[in-house]
Every structure is written in structure tokens, then in C-alpha cells.
Image (tube, helix red, strand yellow):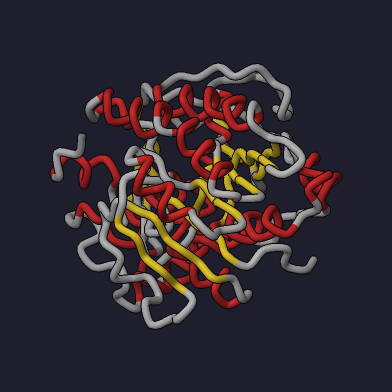
Amino acid sequence: MTRQFERVLVTGGAGYCGSRLVPQLLRSGYKLTVYDIMYFGDDFLPKDSPNLTIVQGDIRDTKRLSNAMAGHDAVVSLACISNDASFELDENLSTSVNFEAFEPMVLAAKNAGVKRFLYASSSSVYGVSDQPNVTEDHPLVPLTLYNKYKGMCEPLLNKHVDDNFTGVTFRPATVCGYAPRQRLDLSVNILTNHAVNKNKITVFGGSQLRPNLHIQDYIDAVEMFLEAPAAKIQGEIFNVGYQNLSLTEIAKLVRKVVIDEFPDRADLEIVTTPSDDLRSYHINSDKVNRVLGFQPRHTIEDAVRELCAAFRDNLLPNSFEDDAYFNVKRLQRLKAA
């Protein structure tokens, strides 16, 4: 695929996925603007690149966002209060950022002459499903404000698409692996942190099925959606996931890899405790392969090995104490509203 666009604006570009996406898109030759509120700073972004512009801004500030969008060809919408535990925060924060700001942002992009808008929704919109394969037309059963609003924004994008404005939504599985702005509050990353640094893996529940996606496949998917022919993606929704495993299966895999990487951890134990987080679903990602030829290539095992290397190289110090790794803890400390 060849690049159709030159200038791309990424909202939330200083987040977990953004921090790995931005360097890759720069390497691919895009001129980028990162628009981010910077709850986690931006020290990890490649600021020495002449093709990177960084704007500190809130997506709820539509005027500032509109000004930043001027002259851009495409928008990648990653910014959100991103955590299924976001109900622990001020409800108005999730409502205003994840829902109320969305349609004004889409209209601002369209009015700025943006040609393509890529929206990162979430596979958690499916909530709980006992279907063996959850495809894109499965009903949405949100359990939290986060996944409720993710689902409610999707038709708001499609309402405004036309021949000059292409909109596409993808629903990624739970992301795992290493990034310059690391999150350690996502299932595979949590279990790996516990295994490496506590020599004990605690599983909450265990039987819940969770779809997973290596962060490299996530950002490869974003780049693919930027380059795909408009006719194939216009108004479409795509699941993007790879391995569907139960939390217990993930824990066993993490244990195996960590012992392999740190042979002195042979006594690493798995402890199971009850959980009230019952989200369980098995997503099917055949559509993105069938329509666009996209196939994830990186496994959960790859993600765990990557994290082990990062811990070994001391890239993730104070991995339990520093709230930079934990979205809700950081936002609580900042009293985000």
C-alpha cells in the first residue's frame, strides 16, 4: 500500500498506543501533529523529528482542536479516558471526553478539510457474550460508561461521512506489550509485572475470555487503515484482535515465559481470587483479514518477552509505585475533571 496522505493529526498521541504509533508513522514519512492533554507528559515522544508538531490541548476545546486540524489530511482519534475502571473517576470526565466531545471533533475535522477520520473504539463494547465468535454485527452490551460511550460514538462518525470524508472505526482487543509510555493496568501487562517483580501472579476470576492484541499489531492496523482504499473502509467497523484466551490461560503463558526469561523464578506461583469484573467475550477478526488482508503477527508471548526485556533493562522502574503506569491512579492524583 502507498501513502495517500501527508499530514496526520493524532489525538491522544502521547498515550500508550500513541507513543509507539507516532515514531512508526514518522518513519513511514508522515508529517504528524500530536494533540494531547499530556496527563502523562510527552518526554518519550521523538521531539527531535522535524516532521513532528506537538500541541498540548484538550479535545473538549473544539476551537483549539479545530485550529490544530487545519491543513491536515487525516485524523487518528485515540484520545479518551481509557480504562474500564473509569467509573472510579468523576463520571462527568468520561462523559465529556469520551462522548460529548466526539461529534464536535468529527465536525471540526470535516470542516477543516480532513479527508479521513479513523476512530479507535474498543472490543469491550461487546461486554459479556457467550457466543463462540463475536463479529462486528453482534449487539453491544456495555457494562461500563467507557464501553457504553465507545459504542455510542461509532454512529456519530458514520452520520457525517460522504464522498469527501471517509470514516472508519476499529474495535481493538485488549492491547499488550511495551511502549515508551507504558501502561501496566492491562491484563497481560499486569500479570507480567506481578510475575517479574512480585514472583507471584494473581488472577482475578480466571474463566473470563479476553481477546488480546500486541501493540505492534495495533499500530500496524492504524497505518493500514490510513492507507486502505476509501471504498473498502467507508463507514465500516472492524474488529482487530488476535488470541482469545481465558485469564487463567494468559497467566499460565506469562508464567512460562517469565521463567524462561528469568530462570531463577522457577517457583513462580499463580494465585486465583474472585472477581467482580465479568467482561467475557471472544471476538472474531475475520472481516479485517477478508476485506483488507490484515493479519496480526505478534503473540501474547512476544508481548511478555518484550516486557521482560524492558524490566531487565530498567526501562520500567517503580512499576507498582509510579502512577505513570496506571491511568486511573494518575487521573485521581491530578484530580482530572
Residue at 19% across, 39% down? 336
Residue at 27% across, 56% down? 40
In the image, is 253 to the left or to the right of 185? Answer: right
Front in this rendered view, residue 269 or 108: 108
Q: Is residue 316 visible?
A: yes
| Location of residue 13 with respect to 212 vertically, above or below | below
Percent x, y of residue 294: 77, 54
Percent x, y of residue 24: 56, 71
| Location of residue 316 with respect to 95 vertically, above or below | below
Residue at 20% across, 34% down? 337
| Location of residue 63 with respect to 274 vertically, above or below | below
Front in this rendered view, residue 157 or 95: 157
In the image, is 165 to the left or to the right of 26? Answer: right
Percent x, y of residue 263: 42, 72
| Location of residue 271 with respect to 223 vertically, above or below | above
Front in this rendered view, residue 321 or 117: 117
Q: Quadrant of residue 143?
A: top left
Q: Is residue 305 visible?
A: no
Q: Residue extending furthest right?
A: 290
Front in this rendered view, residue 146 or 193: 146
Residue at 60% across, 49% down? 113
Percent x, y of residue 279: 49, 25
